[in-house]
Amino acid sequence: MDHLDSRFTRRALLTAGLAAAAAACSSATRRPVSSRTPSINPSPPATPTTSATPTSPPPDPASVKANELGVIPVLMHHRLVDKVDSEYDMTPAWFRAELERLLKERYYPVTTLQVARRDLGHVPAGRAPVVLTFDDSSRGQLHYDGSSIAKDSAVGMLLDFAREHPEFPAVASFYLNKDPFAIGDPHRVVADLAKHGMEVGNHTYDHVPLRLSAAKVQEQLGKLAAMVGAAVPGLQPRTMALPLGVEPSLPALARAGRWRQTTYRNEAVLLVGAEPAHSPWHKSWNPAGVPRIRSSSYGGGTGEFLSTWWLDQIKSGAVTRYVSAGNPGHVTFPKKYADRLAPAYRGMAVAY
Ligand SMILES: [Zn+2]
């Protein structure tokens, strides 16, 4: 990443070590993971979209330290369990601590799709977008207490946290496989995720690495998309997370394809490792390979979170994060970063 000091990137990879290489999934079998760094080839930018119209003039960008070309942490979670027994786990207490930290450090949760669509105009001035992703649709992420979402599930905790802190909305992106959350009722869980404003993403039907034939890749993604569409008519996953970080031999099939009557299209493809993502306005933003930061404890479940290391880097100023200007329809940044802007967005630039 050109604007991340190479020392930090290297150190992160060293520090992350096995974590970065193996951060994958909670499936019982561990496989070696291709943990590639994102390609530097941006695809042609999509038409910019914004989601809000300001009702009052935006603040002076310097006063809120606006920088919409900074990095966005996309945090990757797997299992939420009471007793940690793998490096893919976190306890409810740890997740709660993460939410507390993100709030304290002025992050604001958005979905993967909002980043991919540059739909970040609603992020309040001075706040920094963060994406909370959950892979594998395991039980701890969403389960029920009678007819209610259980308070110790990730969804329940997000909803409770947002009730306590309305300035930190319950927003996250869930990457599902077949029989999501092992409840045996895809309709119910997909409808509940959608009802609460969560993004429903595609993690393939059978959770298999996608080094498969073109037909099988499309079956894996199309079948999951069909399950989501059957659960909530009209709803389609629009971003996906690669199982074990493995790309299809034909990478374009992660973005779009067809299985039987179902076409699918993913506007962003999430990788497994291991650094913050570029701003979607940055010239190196690449929706075909969006890196994530592992937010669970490596070292057999007892070590530090990789996310702790990266959030510390951002907090120290070693890595500059995306900070909203609260000025939808524009891209605001300090003049010294002007060469990082993707040329397609020069007409929207506010450099200060
Ligand atoms: Zn997975």
Image (cartoon, grey):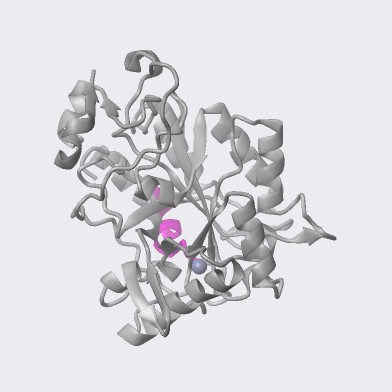
The residue sitting at the right extreme is 146
Task: Tell me: residue 341, above or below residue 79.
Answer: above
Q: Which residues are magenta?
A: 15-24
Task: Tell me: residue 201, above or below residue 243.
Answer: above
Q: In the rendered view of the protein, which quadrant contains the C terminus?
A: top left
Query: Magenta span has 320?
Result: no
Query: Magenta span has 17?
Result: yes
Frontmost residue, 290 versus 296: 290
Q: Number of marks in the image?
A: 0
Residue 80 shows up from this direction? no
Judged by its main secondary structure, the magenta piece is helix
- Residue at the (53%, 70%) spot, across then down: 229
Return the x and y of residue 92 as percentages of the image width and height.
70, 49
Return the x and y of residue 148 as percentages of the image width and height.
80, 55
Return the x and y of residue 168 as percentages of the image width and height.
59, 34
Q: Is residue 201 left or right of residue 146?
A: left
- Residue at the (63%, 75%) spot, across then down: 179
Q: In the rendered view of the protein, which quadrant contains the N terminus?
A: top left
- Residue at the (59%, 29%) spot, across then down: 167
- Residue at the (69%, 73%) spot, across then down: 185
Return the x and y of residue 265 as percentages of the image width and height.
36, 66
Frontmost residue, 193 versus 176: 193
Residue 187 shows up from this direction? yes
Q: Is residue 281 left or right of residue 41?
A: right
